Image (cartoon, rainbow, N blue to C red):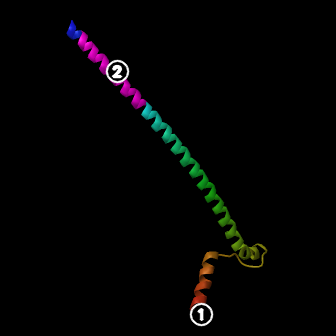
Amino acid sequence: MTSLFAQEIRLSKRHEEIVSQRLMLLQQMENKFIDENKEKASQMQAAETAFKRNLGLLMTLYWASVEEYIPKWEQFLLGRAPYPIGVENENEAENTVQNEAQ
């Protein structure tokens, strides 16, 4: 009878240790989860900020490109010049001709 009582006490102590470890691990998991959520929120904020910055830069570059090509297209749209085919190549061709002339 005494050995069963001693075994019950050992099992009870082991149970308390396991429950204590479980609670500690659950707390660690919760802390890790909270930290990960904070990091994700921070990353999302950084991504949103970068997206807005990039969108602003793209819009700026778009309008700069439009302003660069307006004179070439304006004459075509007014019916005073042919369709500006290969507008990018035209600039390269002009640069090549100028460089060869020098």
Q: Is residue 46 magenta?
A: no
Identify the disc placed on residue 68: none
Q: What percent of the width, then of the height, locates residue 25?
A: 39, 31
Circle 1: residue type: Ala
Q: Secondary structure at mark 1?
A: helix
User: Would residue 7 appear left or right of 73 to someone viewing this image?
Assistant: left
Instruction: Let me know if residue 86 appears in the view.
Output: no
Circle 2: residue type: Glu
Report how far apart the C-alphas of labels 2 and 1 lie in the structure. 92 Å
Q: Residue furthest right?
A: 78
The majority secondary structure of the magenta stretch comes to helix
Check contact, mark 2 vs mark 1: CB within 8 A.
Answer: no
Q: Quadrant of the C terminus?
A: bottom right
| Residue position for label 2 | 16
**10 Å crowding of disc 2: few (<14), some (14-19), many (20+):** few
Q: Residue at x 31, y 19 (%)?
A: 13
Q: Residue furthest top?
A: 1
Instruction: Let me know if residue 16 appears in the view.
Output: yes
Q: Which quadrant holds residue 85? A: bottom right
Q: Is residue 74 above or below residue 14?
A: below
Q: Secondary structure at mark 2?
A: helix
Observer-nearest residue: 64 or 96?
64
Q: Is residue 14 magenta?
A: yes
Look at the image and give the residue range highlighted in magenta: 5-26
Q: What percent of the width, then of the height, locates residue 91?
A: 63, 80
Mark nearest the camera among 2 and 1 is 2
| Residue position for label 1 | 101
Q: Which quadrant holds residue 41? A: top right
Q: Residue at x 79, y 74 (%)?
A: 78
